[in-house]
Amino acid sequence: MSGANFWSNQESAQKVVAELKALKGVLSPIADLTRRMDDLKVLHELAVEAASDQDLQDAAREAGELAAELDRIELKTMLSGPHDAGGCFFSIHAGAGGTESCDWASMLFRMYLRFFERAGFSVEEVDRVDGEEAGIRSTTLRVTGPYAYGYLSCERGVHRLVRISPFNAQGKRQTSFASVDVLPELADVEIQIDWQNDVREDTYCASGAGGQHVNKTASAVRLVHTPTGIVAACQNERSQHKNRATARSMLMAKLFQREQAKRDADLAKLYGDKGEIAFGYQIRSYVLYPYQLVRDERTDLKSPRTDKILDGDIQEFIDAYLRHRLTAKK
């Protein structure tokens, strides 16, 4: 980075800066923890020599904070996969339940936007299909930030909601489903694609809130990989060229994951566990009636704080799943 021509190639420079940021994200917390542990040792020795109860209490409080920080660093050891430190494509799809599930998908969309804000992640909407009556049928976001893929991959699966339906005149309890899928954003993917013969490109008018440009030009791009049937679409940019580039990136990521799943039985099992977007396949249940409780089916973590969780406070569920994975490895 100190080279005279470092910034002459902006794209290459940004990759190096991102790599440096990721490495600092690993090393800095460890260096800071080591320094604080040395300071704590000195503080404890001085407190014992002075027989000061206040200093001993301060040392105990600092020891508790260091233990919590050590636990967070240990959890990060579970984010050591080849793509964990990078960004991702984050998708939500409504499942069984019609309008109910479309509304539930929009609730999940809001929940994750709040979580991204808390985590300091940057978000860009890539594609969106609204429900016929309410909510969203599906949406895809590009999420960037330190360990975005590593953390969000813990959310992959089916999410189940139980509540009194706002769309049912009889006020009956309804169960809705929506799925979350996460793909790593790959900068350099070694996937051979015959773009001319194996990929069909469709262009169409973007949907959205309107404006001077939306719905007036065929700027949205949908790519279909005909040998596999895999689809990638993007409509958020004004330029068809930019939409095409993003759709190609998504298609390569999906094909890369497909190839990885073939070679890696564990990844194939992880991806297959998502199953149908229906009852019996959920990873987490959100019950709002007749009681309020959120339960993760993988870790058995339960919380009655449904309002805060639906407002994006889901870090405890991600941490619990990382601990679950850590225990399984041991």
Image (cartoon, grey):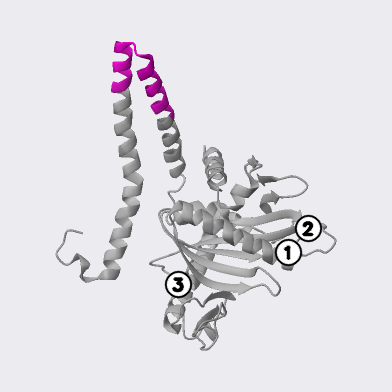
Local secondary structure at mark 3: helix
Looking at the picture, tell me which residue is in the foreground, 202 or 107.
107
Quadrant where the N terminus sits is: bottom left
Q: Which residues are magenta?
A: 42-64
N-terminal-most mark, 2 or 1: 1
> Upstream in the sequence, badge 2 or badge 3?
2
- The mark lying in front, picked from 3 and 1, is 1
The residue under label 1 is: 100
- C-alpha distance separating marks 2 and 1: 8 Å
Q: Is residue 168 magenta?
A: no
Q: Position of residue 151 (x, y in %)?
A: 49, 51
Res 208 label: none
Q: Amino acid at mark 2?
A: Gln
CB under 8 Å between callouts 2 and 1? Answer: yes
Picture quadrant of residue 320? top right
Is there any visible trace of residue 50 in the rendered image? yes
Amino acid type shown at disc 1? Glu
Q: Position of residue 256 (x, y in %)?
A: 48, 66
Marks 3 & 1, CB-CB < 8 Å contact: no
Question: Tag 1, which secondary structure?
Answer: helix
**Main secondary-structure element of the magenta-colored stretch:** helix
* Lower sequence index among marks 3 and 1: 1
| Residue type beneath disc 3 | Ser
Q: CA distance from mark 3 to mark 1?
A: 32 Å
Q: Which residue is mark 2?
A: 174
Q: Residue furthest right?
A: 170
Q: Nearer the viewer, residue 186 or 41?
A: 41
